[in-house]
Image (cartoon, rainbow, N blue to C red):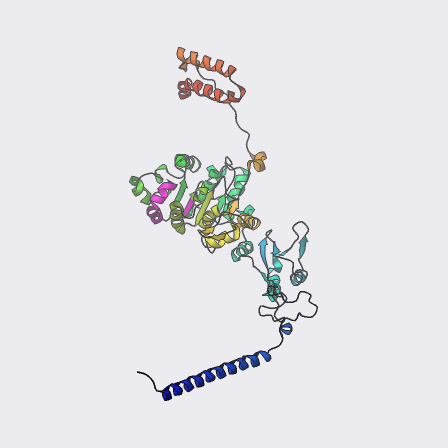
Amino acid sequence: MACSKEEIERKRLAAIRKRQEKISSQLKHKDSIANAFSALKPIAEIVKPSAGSSLGFQPYAKPDSSKGPIGNSSMPITRVVTGTTYLISEDRFEVNPSEFSTPLINIFKTIPSKSYDENSKLWNFSLKDYTDFMNKVSSLVPHVVIGPLPSYALKIINTPIMDPNIVDLSPIESTLRNKLMPFQEYGVRFAIARRGRCMIADDMGLGKTFQALAVASYYRHDWPLLIVTTSSMRETWQSKIHELLPSVPMMNIVTLTTSQDSQLVADRQTEVVIVSFKIASMHKELLQNKKFGVIIVDESHNLKSHKAQCTAALARVGRSAARIILLSGTPALSRPAELYTQLALIEPRLFPSFTEYGKRYCAGKQTSFGWDMTGQSNLPELQIILQKRFLIRRTKDQVLTKLEEKTRETVLLDQSLLQFTKEDEQGLTQMAKNYQSTRSSEKYAALITFFSKSAEVKIPAIWYI
């Protein structure tokens, strides 16, 4: 449908009007933007370098460390000085700070018993001043934090112990008492001065069995007696009791090997029970019900793991025991973690936990797999605690002059009793020739073989003796 001339003109005028309105609106928007920029400072003033700076604008410059975390210079960041205290003797302790601190050194100098070690570069003090020292150091918290000595260490040091030399050994059966050497007597006195709860860690061959039985004899009124040892030593202990304590009837000594012996163990007349480590873990309820008053643990280093069944079994059995004597010729002094179970058996409530013990003496550290307690730390302090409360150890070199001389005797065998066949003679003769022609590096092995074969023909004569 065609438009008339009047309609065409009206639409043209309307289009011109809309176009003019649009142009006017765009001009107003440009003017507002220009006015906004004119109100801003020049860019040169915004990035103007600070006084004394030749670097100008540095968008990645390091923050000023002299200011606080929010840039406030009135809130400086101070480093905390930490430190540990530990025993270096029965009457002195040492302090090891993480770094130098003038306020801390000033406090050190106010302690009357102060002493500076030129070698270790550390300060040490008398335990008499320990309380005063900790009170003064506490005034430096939180800038200086010094860890205290463990309460159990202070308890051991401050608890008086009977002088071993005044212990009366007359309650010990005379047969055994008269066989004790002087150093063995002192070992017995040491154990009695510690209420019959200790570890005798003498070298092999110095008579730990004699000393343990002497302590057990002293506390005869606390029996029944339990002896835990290795399988190979059960008969040896039984024979030693029969030899050294003749007042104990053989019928009152039971060696627990099978379940058939359970009735004998439970019998009221049974005074002594000898058991291996393995059997002890299998019959822990039977042994616990017996309520042993005295326990001897031979080769106690076998209890090195606090997770082992035998360790847990003896811990239960030992709750009723008034006396516990541990024997070990090889105490793991360089592996403190292996000592914990033995010390806890002697004094169950001394250490707060294995974790606390490990952090103090095993350099315990937390890993993704749990606590790592394979290290060692504060060993001098641990050694002091052991010697004061738990352990006595003598080596052969220390007591060599007090040992009896060895008895050497030559026994001649009756040659008529030797089973020396022609084949034996030919074989030994050939071995002798081989020994002569053997290289020097192999002579020892050849000699051992010759010795073993020659011993076989002597068996009948030895049986005769």
**In terms of depth relative to the viewer, which is nearer, 337 or 44?**
44
Q: Give the magenta range.
A: 274-295
Q: Is residue 149 left or right of residue 259?
A: right
- What is the x, y in percent for residue 410? 50, 21
Quadrant of the rendered image containing residue 234: top left
- What is the x, y in percent for residue 144? 60, 63
Q: Is residue 93 left or right of residue 256?
A: right
Q: Is residue 422 left or right of residue 71?
A: left
Farthest-out residue, right: 52
- 272 vs 132: above or below: above
**In terms of depth relative to the viewer, which is nearer, 298 or 426?**
426
- What is the x, y in percent for residue 77? 60, 66
Q: On the rendered image, what quadrant is the N terminus found in?
A: bottom left
Farthest-out residue, bottom: 6
- What is the x, y in percent for residue 51? 69, 70
**In terms of depth relative to the viewer, which is nearer, 66 or 102?**
66
Q: Is residue 282 covered in magenta? A: yes
Q: On the rendered image, what quadrant is the C terminus found in?
A: top left
Task: Give the number of callouts.
Answer: 0
Q: Is residue 173 covered in magenta? A: no
Q: Is residue 218 visible?
A: no
Q: Is residue 19 visible?
A: yes
Q: Residue at x 58, y 36 (%)?
A: 397
Quadrant of the rendered image containing residue 47: bottom right
